[in-house]
Amino acid sequence: MAAVSMRLPVARKPARPSASRSGEKHLVAPGDTITTDTGYMRGHGTYVEEEKLIASVAGAVERVNKLVCVKALKTRYNGEVGDIVVGRITEVQQKRWKVETNSRLDSVLLLSSMNLPGGELRRRSAEDELAMRDYLQEGDLISAEVQSVFSDGAVSLHTRSLKYGKLGQGVLVQVSPSLVKRQKTHFHDLPCGASVILGNNGFIWIYPTPEQREEEAGGFTTNLEPVPLSDREVISRLRNCIVALVTEKLMLFDTSILYCYEASLPHQIKDILKPEVMEEIVLETRQRLLDLEG
Amino acid sequence: MAAAELLSDEGYRLDGRRPNELRKVRARMGVFEQADGSAYIEQGNTKALAVVYGPHELRGSRSRALPDRALVHCQYSLAAFSTSERRRRPPHGDRQTAELALHLRQTFEAAILTQLYPRSQIDIYVQILQADGGNYCAGVNAATLALMDAGIPMKDFVCASSAGLAADTALADLSWPEEAAGGPQLALALLPASGQIALLQLSARLHQQRLELALEAALAACRSLHAVLDAVVRERLRQASQALGD
């Protein structure tokens, strides 16, 4: 008989009063006038009424020369060319797939932007169209890159490289897009024994590191071999660490995830989700990151 | 009428408030992690929860998508345990909740900058957990906070308050016994910075000369409420920016 543990919620004191620079930030709520100077250009999160620049979202004002914009705390993903995203297929349409990427409109993956198995380059025929469902079905997860952005904000994806394609066994963590740091590469093989894809849209994919890179597969054949227990434990621990980092609002990048993983090793995997353990681990991670910088 | 009971000779209402005094407001943003935006508000004993999803692609009928702006879809519901007698309400089709959902939609279509999101949909779900008067207004206030939590651009806050009359004195923020007394009730949704009224609803008949009185009381109540909600939003911003400070 397994023991059951119960915890009662209690109001916790707010986080450490560290030397924060929030005094410098100009925080606004919708309806606040940012400036009445007409020389400024309005950016995202603002609108103009009667020669006044007024905020339309709740957030911090960012001023770049003459451009004023307000960055909201939490938004859906806004696609930009060159971003790596992880998405889920929602629909199979005539010559394209609709992919859900946590943005305000579903993204589009055209059949012509998809790699064919074997990496062949040829014109897509009618048979390819009919065989679309054999490649990707509703519910499949893919990794792709943003090719272009339509005028209404919808994003067009492509998987024209062998590193993109259908994702096999692993764990998906959905976080806010603003917490994923922009880096040169978003595919990381962590030394602890798992690999991670940090999608710019906030979808994080953790999977066991493949033994050898299959060059000819082109990302369609999913590896369905059983994953050993040690790999599963590493993946679970990473997943809990990412959840801890997100709860404490720390930016996600390979170094922060790795430091958090190392800080969590003394604890059991399931204990990482307890609030006090989360605080402790993330505090240690923050410390190490500060030491790294300074 | 019951006007004499609503206001005592010393000028106190049934729950001890002054005529222009609001009930105690407690609000919190970011109650749920899964939704894009969420907020919880308590005005006296009235408790309202609002959850916002969006903007996202329309699910189901794509034909309803508007080519130049976002579709705002609202749902307003009263929990079965919200009133003194447990009453199971049908999930859709209750005339009153359908009407209030329509009012919510009209109110927020006026406040949200929908032109920024063509062909997408914004869902606002309001649930009243405890109904003690001013249910719709509490729902509007909660939805405002939830929309700000979701980062959806709005022209301004939308603050709503109810008002009524007892003889010649206007009462602000009616509680349930005051609503049940049967006098005229005004529900007002205001955009405070510009002073524009998003929704004005009056039930029962009211003499034109008295309308100004009730309207003024409701406007003043909305402005005080704006100050409270503004403080809640700034506190949340401060906490979040402190956490993200590095």
Image: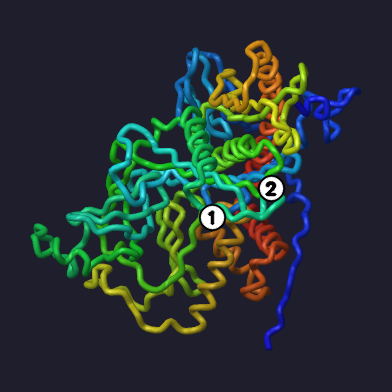
- On the question of residue A22 being in view, the answer is no
Q: Is residue A122 left or right of residue B244?
A: left
Which kind of residue does numbered mark 1 sit on? Gln
* Residue at image location 36% in from the left, 60% down from the top: A88
B191 or B82: nearer the viewer: B82
Query: Residue A139: x percent and y percent?
Result: 34, 65
Which kind of residue does numbered mark 2 sit on? Gln
The chain holding disc 2 is B
Element marked by disc 1: loop
Question: What colour scheme governs how the chains and residues are painted in the rendered image of this protein?
Answer: rainbow
Q: Is residue B97 left or right of residue A43?
A: right
Q: Residue furthest top?
A: B209
What is the quadrant of residue A78 in the picture? top left
* Residue at image location 26% in from the left, 60% down from the top: A161
Residue B34 shows which numbered tag? 1
Q: CA distance from mark 1 to mark 2?
A: 23 Å
Query: Residue A270: x percent and y percent?
Result: 63, 73
| For residue A91, above or below residue B36 | below
Query: Residue A145: x percent and y percent?
Result: 32, 53
